[in-house]
Image: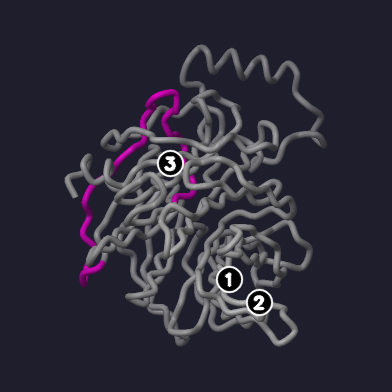
């Protein structure tokens, strides 16, 4: 998560700081920096404007910086059925329908990033495997959940240890029949694991390889088809690695800071649309989303968009996690993009939520 100090950019900001200083809490009662807004009055982003379509309710843990990362699952047999899962990194997981209405809340832990893969085999039948990096469960670095595709109910399955000083980002992948859980840390280290359901019904979790980048990571996403892992180094850019089990081979495909990305580099997601695969990255420093086409031998940069207010839904600032899915998704005929908004209603210190945007509108704005 990108952290900023207060900046005296206006007389209003100066007055606000003085007022806060006058009622400062004792040192022992000061708030963790991660429990504060990233935005600090940021304006709506610098990318090509795209209208917000809908939003979720604000997360329910007071004024803390809690919302972080979303993910989308759609029934492969009925695109009107599905869920959006979002993390509240101070309290638990939220489950929403495809229009943003809250369906379920699972308290517990401090889940930061979330990802999922369908077709996971269990004794009770196939389930959707859901995993979240978690710093709030003793002895665990990741929390594993199972989503029942028939009922759309999410349940905690198990807590598994990860050999990292501070587990932070997470993504899932498939390599053949293997389900992969990739967790990264605030020190740039990455751990790749396999997971299966054991005969006793509990997770069988095994570390497969270790690698890393020089500085802090968080966002990551796996291209199952191409066998690639995309990893965000927050202050440096986006890396691409192979998804094998041997020594990791990686390269930076988009540097930061640059015209494409203003640190921190945060959420990463992939969207498939026919033969095309699109990579979308949160450029948190200027509240924008950069887009590349990545199904060819080299990534092809195609522009940036930002989400602006529309019909009572405010624009997106200081964004963190992002998720996307192509094809019909609920009421979105060509696909859905969901992203965290650091200040719901554009009010500093306000609760946070997730915004929904149509992929068709993004394509039109960027001429994709």
What residue is at 45 percent from the left and 58 percent from the top?
74
Q: Nearer the viewer, residue 186 or 334?
A: 334
- Determine crowd level at label 3: few under 14, some 14-19, many 20+ residues with C-alpha closer than 10 A: many
Whole-number angstrom distance, CA of label 3 to CA of label 1: 25 Å
Magenta: main secondary structure equals: loop
Viewer-nearest of discs 3 and 2: 2
Q: Position of residue 212 (x, y in %)?
A: 50, 71
According to the image, what is the colour scheme of the structure?
one colour
Q: Nearer the viewer, residue 193 or 128?
A: 128
Whole-number angstrom distance, CA of label 1 to CA of label 2: 8 Å
Q: Of helix, strand and loop, which one carries label 2? A: loop
Q: Which of the labelled discs sits on residue 164, or is there none?
A: none
Viewer-nearest of discs 3 and 1: 1
Q: Which residues are magenta?
A: 295-322
Give the residue pinned by disc 1.
127
Task: Give left or right: position of 74 versus 228.
Answer: right
Marks 1 and 2 close (CB-CB < 8 Å)? yes
Marks 3 and 1 close (CB-CB < 8 Å)? no
Q: Of helix, strand and loop, which one carries label 1? A: strand
Residue 133, picture quadrant:
bottom right
Q: Is residue 307 visible?
A: yes
- Determine crowd level at label 2: few under 14, some 14-19, many 20+ residues with C-alpha closer than 10 A: few
Number of callouts: 3
Q: Position of residue 129 (x, y in %)?
A: 57, 69
Instruction: Please determine whether, in this image, residue 286 is positioned above or below residue 247.
Output: above
Q: Which of the labelled discs sits on residue 124, or is there none?
A: 2
Instruction: Please determine whether, in this image, residue 268 is positioned above or below residue 165.
Output: above
Q: Is residue 90 magenta?
A: no
Give the residue pinned by disc 3.
356
């Amino acid at each position: 998560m990108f952290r900023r100090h207060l900046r005296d950019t206006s007389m209003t900001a100066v007055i606000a700081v003085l007022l806060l200083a006058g009622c400062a809490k004792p040192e022992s009662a000061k708030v963790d920096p991660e429990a504060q807004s990233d935005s600090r009055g940021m304006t709506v982003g610098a990318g090509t404007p795209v209208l917000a379509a809908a939003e979720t309710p604000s997360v329910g843990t007071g004024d803390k910086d809690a919302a972080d990362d979303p993910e989308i699952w759609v029934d492969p047999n009925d695109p009107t059925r599905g869920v959006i899962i979002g993390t509240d990194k101070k309290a638990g997981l939220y489950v929403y329908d495809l229009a943003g209405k809250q369906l379920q809340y699972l308290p517990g832990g401090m889940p930061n990033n979330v990802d999922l893969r369908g077709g996971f085999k269990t004794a009770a039948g196939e389930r959707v495997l859901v995993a979240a990096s978690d710093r709030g469960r003793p002895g665990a670095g990741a929390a594993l959940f199972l989503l029942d595709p028939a009922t759309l109910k999410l349940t905690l399955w198990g807590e598994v240890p990860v050999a990292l000083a501070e587990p932070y980002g997470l993504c899932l992948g498939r390599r053949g029949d293997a389900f992969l859980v990739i967790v990264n840390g605030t020190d740039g280290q990455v751990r790749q694991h396999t997971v299966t359901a054991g005969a006793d019904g509990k997770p069988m979790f095994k570390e497969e390889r270790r690698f890393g980048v020089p500085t802090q990571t968080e966002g990551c996403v796996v291209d199952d088809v191409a066998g690639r892992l995309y990893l965000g180094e927050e202050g440096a850019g986006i890396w691409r690695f192979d998804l094998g089990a041997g020594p990791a081979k990686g390269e930076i495909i988009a540097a930061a800071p640059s015209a494409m990305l203003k640190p921190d580099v945060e959420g990463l997601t992939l969207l498939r649309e026919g033969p095309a695969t699109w990579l979308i990255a949160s450029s948190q420093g200027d509240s924008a989303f950069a887009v590349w086409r990545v199904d060819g031998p080299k990534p092809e940069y195609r522009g940036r968009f930002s989400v602006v207010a529309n019909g009572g839904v405010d624009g997106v600032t200081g964004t963190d996690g992002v998720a996307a899915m192509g094809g019909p998704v609920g009421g979105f005929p060509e696909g859905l993009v969901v992203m965290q908004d650091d200040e719901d209603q554009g009010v500093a210190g306000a609760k946070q939520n997730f915004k929904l945007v149509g992929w068709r509108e993004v394509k039109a704005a960027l001429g994709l």
